[in-house]
Image (cartoon, rainbow, N blue to C red):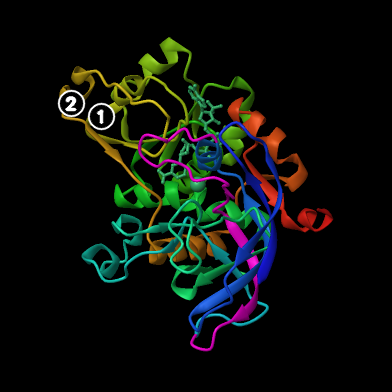
Amino acid sequence: MNATKAYAAASASSPLQPTTIRRREPTDRDVELDILFCGICHSDLHAVRDEWKSLIPTVYPIVPGHEIVGRVRRVGGAVTKYRVGELAAVGCLVGSDRTCPMCRADHENLCAAQVWTFNGPDEHLGGVTYGGYSQRVVVDEHFVLKVPESLDPAGAAPLLCAGITSWSPLRRHGVAPGKRVGIVGLGGLGHMGVKFARALGAHTVAFTTSPTKAEDALRLGADEVVISRDRAAMQARAGTLDFVLDTVSAAHDVGAYLDLLAPEGNLTLVGAPEQPISVPAFSLLMGCRNLSGSAIGGLAETQEMLDFCGEHGITADVEVIAIQQVNEAYERLLRSDVKYRFCIDMASLEQE
Ligand code: NAP
Ligand code: ZN
C-alpha cells in the first residue's frame, strides 16, 4: 500500500485532523510528487464545510488542497515530460475524458467528465480523490504542470488555482494596455488578479471592504484602490470600467459592481458564495452590460500562466504555515484576514 500522511475532515462540522490515506502505485502514465507546499483556497473551506451541498455534495472524509507544488519522486514508464527531482505542480483537475470537443480544444476545465483533485470520483481506487494536504500525490502526467525553477515554490503553489482562475478571464476578455479593469475582493484570487491585470498593462482599480489592505493594493500593482463601503467613491467610478473580476467568497451586492461597467462591459464572477446571487435587471440593461462566470482554466492555459509568471517573476504573497495551524487559518480566511494566501509547508506533516 502506498500510504501517505494527510489531513482530513470527517464531517462538515469537524476540524481537519491527521490521518493516513492510500495513493495508487504509479501506472505507466503517472507522476508521483513529494508535496512541498499546498495553498489554502477558499474553495477548500467551502467544500470541507459542505457549503456547496446542493450542487456538489462533499463526500467525507475529505482531504482538501488543489494548489500543489512538489518534487517528482517517481515516474511511470510511459511518462515523457517529467524527470525525477524536477519541480512540478498539480492544480484543481486530475482527470477529464480527453476526447470531448472541450478537451480537444484544451478546455479540460469545461469537460463534463472532469475529475477534481479532491472530492472527485477516483477511477483507480474507488471512492473519491484526495487533495494536497498530504505528503504525496499520484497524477496522470497530462494533469501535471511544469513550475519554472526560478519561482519560489511556496509562492508558486497558489498559482495553480488562485492564479489560473484570475488569469483565464482576464485573458479571455482582452485585458491589455488601454483597458480599465476592476478587481473585487483582495484575497487569494483578487491579489493575483491585481498582479496580472497590472502585468498585462491595464489600468487597474482594486475594490476592497478592508481599509487595512488599501496600501497593499497599490503595492501589489493597483493604480487606484476603492473602499467599496464608501458609496461616494463607488458612485464616482460608475460607468468607467471595461471589465470587472469579482472574486468575493460571500453574499454581496453584485449590482453595485455591474454599475461600474462602461457600456457593453463585462463582469465575470469567479467567487462561489454558498447562496444564489441576485442582480438588479437595470444594472444589466442600461449600457447592455454582460455578466459571466469562469471556472479555473485548461491545462495548456495553466502552463502558459506559469510560464508568464516565470518570465515576469510573479508569485503569490503567501503566509507560510504548518499544517497544524490549518484550522486556525480557516477561521482567519472567514474573517478576510489573510495577506494574501495561506500556504502549508508540507514538511510539517512529518511530525504527525
Ligand atoms: P479569499 O482569499 O477568502 O478572498 C475572498 C475575498 O473576498 C476576501 O479577502 C474579501 O476581500 C472579500 N470578501 C469576503 N467576504 C466578503 C463580504 N461578505 N463582502 C464583500 N467582500 C467580501 O478567497 P479566495 O480563495 O480568493 O476565493 C474567492 C472565491 O472564489 C471563493 O468563493 C472560492 O470558492 C472561489 N473560487 C472560484 C474558482 C473558480 O474556478 N471560479 C476557483 C477558486 C476559488 P476584501 O477584504 O478585500 O474585501
Ligand atoms: Zn481553488
Circle 1 Cα neighbour tier, 10 Å, few/some/many (<14 / 14–19 / ≥20) = many
Are the two marked residues, 1 and 2, in contact with CB atoms closer than 8 angstroms? yes
Q: Position of residue 134 (x, y in %)?
A: 66, 57
Which segment did they paint magenta? 49-78
Q: Is residue 1 visible?
A: yes
Using the image as rendered, state which of residue 334 and residue 318 is in the foreground: 334
Secondary structure under badge 1?
strand
Q: Residue at x 42, y 51 (%)?
A: 167
Q: Is residue 221 visible?
A: no
Q: Is mark 1 within 8 Å of ligand 1?
A: no
Q: Is 146 situated left or right of 55 in this image?
A: right
Q: Is residue 58 found inside the magenta-colored segment of the image?
A: yes
Q: Is mark 2 within 8 Å of ligand 1?
A: no
Would you name the residue on which mark 1 appears? 262
Quarter of the image where one finds residue 87: bottom right
The amino acid type, in three-letter code, at marker 2 is Gly
Is 120 located above or below residue 30 in the figure? above
Quarter of the image where one finds residue 261: top left
Q: Position of residue 327 (x, y in %)?
A: 69, 36
Q: Position of residue 258 (x, y in %)?
A: 30, 25
Is 287 located above or below residue 150 in the figure? above
Q: Is 170 situated left or right of 33 in this image?
A: left
Q: Position of residue 256 (x, y in %)?
A: 34, 19
Q: How many numbered markers are drawn?
A: 2
Circle 2 Cα neighbour tier, 10 Å, few/some/many (<14 / 14–19 / ≥20) = some
